[in-house]
Image (cartoon, helix red, strand yellow):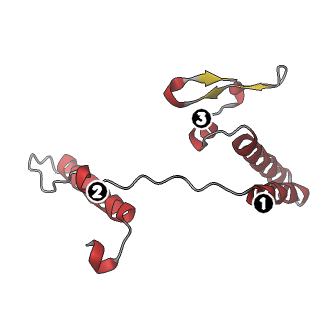
Amino acid sequence: MQNEIELAPRSIRRKYVSIQQYCDYLRMVLNLNEIFFRFTARKFQLPRTLPRTLSREEIKELILAATFQYQQAWSEYKERLAVRNMCIIELLFCLGLRVGELSALDMADYWPEENTVLIRGKGRKESY
């Protein structure tokens, strides 16, 4: 399959997993005991790659774009979106949060009187 279409290993794995999930769904809906698709993840182990980091210039451009979005906001809704985006960028790059840590944040995690944000990291470790 990889040679015919020239897909990346990650794309092939994603397609196989989708097929497997669909087959599992059919087995559940049709109440079948027969397994008609066998998939082992070991066949598709992906090489570990380091994440690509943004340069300082790219980060500056993101901050400038968010600031510009705030300045150009023409409604309260657009202004709130711009403030949210600026907060996301600040938290990701200034605090070095992971995306998962950022998406797990809730308003209750922010304590303005102490100027503190509660971060729940990997392994349920908490940090402030």
Residue visible at 20% across and 46% down in the picture: 28
Q: Do the residues labelled 3 and 1 touch (CB within 8 Å)?
A: no
Q: Quadrant of the N terminus?
A: bottom left
Disc 3 packing (10 Å; few <14; some 14–19; many ≥20): few
Q: Mark 3 points at which residue?
A: 104
Q: Residue furthest top?
A: 114
Mark 3 → mark 1, Cα distance in angstroms: 28 Å
Q: In which quarter of the image is residue 23?
A: bottom left
Q: Mark 1 points at which residue?
A: 57
Q: Name the residue under label 2.
A: 44
Tell me if I can see residue 10 in this picture. yes
x and y percentages locating residue 125 in the rendered image: 56, 23
Residue visible at 16% across and 56% down in the picture: 37
Disc 2 packing (10 Å; few <14; some 14–19; many ≥20): some
Disc 1 packing (10 Å; few <14; some 14–19; many ≥20): few
x and y percentages locating residue 10 in the rendered image: 38, 61
Q: Quick check: 80 above or below 64?
A: above
Residue visible at 38% across and 64% down in the picture: 11
Q: In which quarter of the image is the C terminus?
A: top right
Mark 2 → mark 1, Cα distance in angstroms: 36 Å
Q: Nearer the viewer, residue 88 or 84?
A: 88
Q: Check disc 1 and give the amino acid type.
A: Glu
Secondary structure beneath label 1: helix
Q: Quadrant of residue 103?
A: top right
Secondary structure beneath label 2: helix
In the figure, is residue 45 to the left or right of 99?
Answer: left
Secondary structure beneath label 3: loop
Q: Are marks 2 and 1 in contact (CB under 8 Å)?
A: no
Q: Check disc 3 and give the amino acid type.
A: Ala
Q: Residue 99: which disc?
A: none
